[in-house]
Image (spheres, coloured by chain):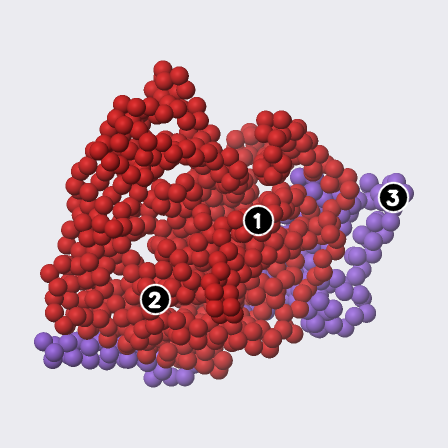
Amino acid sequence: MLWLTIGVVVGITVLVIAYVTAPLWRPRKPLVETDDTPLTALIERKDATLRAIKEVEFDYQMGKLSEEDFERDNVRLRHQAIALIRHIEELAPDAGELDTQLETLIAQQREVSDSASGNGADVAEAETEPEVLLEAEKIFCPTCGALAAPDDNFCATCGAPLRKATPA
Amino acid sequence: MIFNIGYLALVIGLVVALFGTFAGYWGGRTRSANLADSSFHAVYAVGALVVLASVILWYGLLTDQFQVNYVWSHSERALSSFYKFSAFWGGQAGSLLFWTLLLSIYSVIAAITFRKQQIVLMPFVNAVLLITSAFFLALLIFAANPFEQIAFTPPDGQGLNPLLQNYWMVAHPVMLYLGWVGLTIPFAFAVASLLSKKLGNTWVRIVRRWTLVPWMFLSAGIIMGSQWAYMELGWGGYWAWDPVENASFLPWLTATAFLHSIIIQDRRGMLKIWNMVLIWLTYFLVILGTFTTRSGILESVHSLALSNIGPFFLGFLIFVVFGFLWLLFDRLPLLRSENRIDAVMSREAAFLANNWLFLGLAFATLWGTFFPMFSEIVTGQRISVAAPWFEKVNGPLFLLLLIMMGVGPLLGWRRTSLSQLRRQFMWPLLITLVSGVALFFMSPRIYPVVGLAASIFVAATIAQEFIRGVMARRTSTGENPALAFWHLIRRSGQRYGGYIVHLAIVLMGVAIIGNEFYVTRTDVTLAPGETAVVGGYTFVFNGLNAEHVGNRTEFAAYFSVLDQDGQKALGTVTPRRNIYDKTPDQPTSEVGLYMRPLEDLYVVLNGWEDGVVTVSIFINPLTMWLWIGGILLILGTLFSLWPRPHPRSATARAPAAPAIAG
């Protein structure tokens, strides 16, 4: 009985050791970061931004955001999304699906700007109008999509270099 | 023989877990796929070994192998197979093995799910999970061996603790452990992202689901525990701020705070350090809770035995505290916030206030739980803070939290303007004011009325959210109201599932207020045929009956319940007492219960002599809503968990694959 126990336990031990150490005898291989490429990070950020746009729209429809706040957030987020999608396009030009997304976004963006300038007739909202127009000239961080001043070299939010974005 | 194999399986498991911890950590650091793969194999191997050990213990329990000390002290021949099966987690060593079993299962599922997706994080995740497993395996091997054998085979076991022979008590620990153990997974991801310096928002997005599922189990476990206390302990209530109840409640508080604050990190890139701290506190409190329930360091009805596991736990807790804090401080520069809070009247600020309240509750509860121990260390005398202390301190915090629950969701991100505030709060406040005044006229007591009015306020805000949401969907899609409602909770499950959970909490809050302020208790002694009129009901005592069932004798007192005038029969209640053959000095109580939406009639059999019984009749207002709230809470969490249709993201992801290959 004792010998049987010892036999079973030794058998289990050998099996477990062989199984757990098996990968160590294979040829050495580094961990490949399929989950950590700049592209997947960008896509994740873009998805988050698109979600944020939806949420802002929903909040506005629910009356939680004033028109002014909604427009500012919406414009900012759409700019972010556009910057991110452009950057994804650069990294993966064959991402054909993104084209249409970008088109839609830009088209929607125009609508928002149009409606903003349409509503901006009264004095109170006149202030926001040039800001919306100005923002088109500002640049956005290709890594995180944050707004940056045109002469900045690095992103104030994430520290990524801003100039890399310009096509070579 | 077979039990020696069980024990040695645990020993091999410990060695493999320690090796896997090293392989995961070092593999992650040096980016070695070989070591990383080895850590995955270690997770699977530990899982298999722990399952093997568990099956062996179950075999021992189900086949009455009383030469095993654990089986002898927690089972008996007359016990039904169902309770023999559940005796697995009825005692110390077994429940620690059960912990380890669940952790192994969770670890294997996490490893399989994320092996291909989170290649850099996973080796570290494996390391954290395996070191937790290693700790519990070490406990089982050195301090609480479930396979310890006695030199001879006793003819029968000592029986399972009578309090545990109840179906709620079978399900309650399972749910609680599924919750507790599951919370190790988000902690493992947090530590993995610190170790790998991948401190973006990825881990937060991954762990939302993996926190919600354990959170749901933990909530269910706590509610089932309350249900058990209510039905079995027979003192009229469901929550006594007992240290063991607190042990389950503490990680629930921090996990709930975590679930809320990760929304801000995901949405605005803020509170990164805070989230790390919250999930670490949760993990710490889980281990601490296991320690306090298992070591008997805090006296309570649940602590079944004092044992030598204390020093192990203390050592591991110190390791968890200092190891994590060192890691966090080292990575602090990488955890900068991407945004600031812009205004007090914003959803971020509301979330933050909610977090502080949860943490305040957790600290107050922790302090009250450990105060007896501290007082014993300092003054040599054990001074307990009882339920009234907890109620006094936590009551106002809960009230504030309830109000925040109504306010927070109505605020917009970043800032909310005055006109927006008016638009959002006018109707709920109006409804609250009117119903508050009406309630005050019905019952002129300030605390419960304020509490109930706050509940009405939150319910009104939630109703408004649903109505406006449906209307917004209707204007944009033209759907009919029912379809719009369905799409609302289907498409925005995270938000509307959350609202359903909030509503569940409101219902439970209402039940708690009712029980806190409006309970009445009447003790009566009745001979067969006599009646008692209590709280607008007539109780007729029909007689006492004794019957031997399985391993116990059941004494049942039969009552009919009629209306005030004794004209209309409403139903019956049958309070019982069970006296177990093996432990006649520990009778258990089965209360007689007649539930109505507005109040429970709750009857406890206290004693009997020559057919004359003494019973306590409690009228517990609104208690039913506690259980309805519990079910709704689970339902809301499921809606929140359910994957929502996301066609856009799926197509956008597709082109990523060839780009990586190229």
Q: Distance between the residues labelled 2 and 1?
A: 31 Å
Q: Mark 1 lies on which chain?
A: B
Q: Name the residue under label 3.
A: A124
Element type at mark 3: helix
- The answer to whether B373 is drawn above or below residue B556 in the figure is below
- The answer to whether B2 is drawn above or below residue B359 in the figure is below
Q: Mark 3 lies on which chain?
A: A
Foreground residue, B124 or B288? Answer: B288
Question: Residue B537's x, y, as percent?
Answer: 40, 24
Q: What residue type is labelled 2?
A: Leu
Element type at mark 1: helix
Q: Which amino acid does label 3 sit on?
A: Ala
Question: Residue B445's x, y, as percent?
Answer: 60, 34
Q: Which amino acid does label 1 sit on?
A: Lys
Q: Residue furthest right?
A: A123
Question: Residue B523's x, y, as percent?
Answer: 38, 34
- In this rendering, does residue A75 appear at all? no
Give the mark toward the camera: 2 or 3. 2
- In this rendering, does residue B175 appear at all? yes
Within-10-Å neighbours for mark 2: few <14, some 14–19, many 20+: few
Q: Colour of chain A?
A: purple
Q: Distance between the residues labelled 2 and 3?
A: 73 Å
Residue at x 31% of width, y 67% of height: B47
Question: Residue B569's x, y, as percent?
Answer: 34, 20
Within-10-Å neighbours for mark 1: few <14, some 14–19, many 20+: few
Q: Mark 2 points at which residue?
A: B306
Q: Quadrant of the N terminus of chain A?
A: bottom left
Q: Mark 1 points at which residue?
A: B392
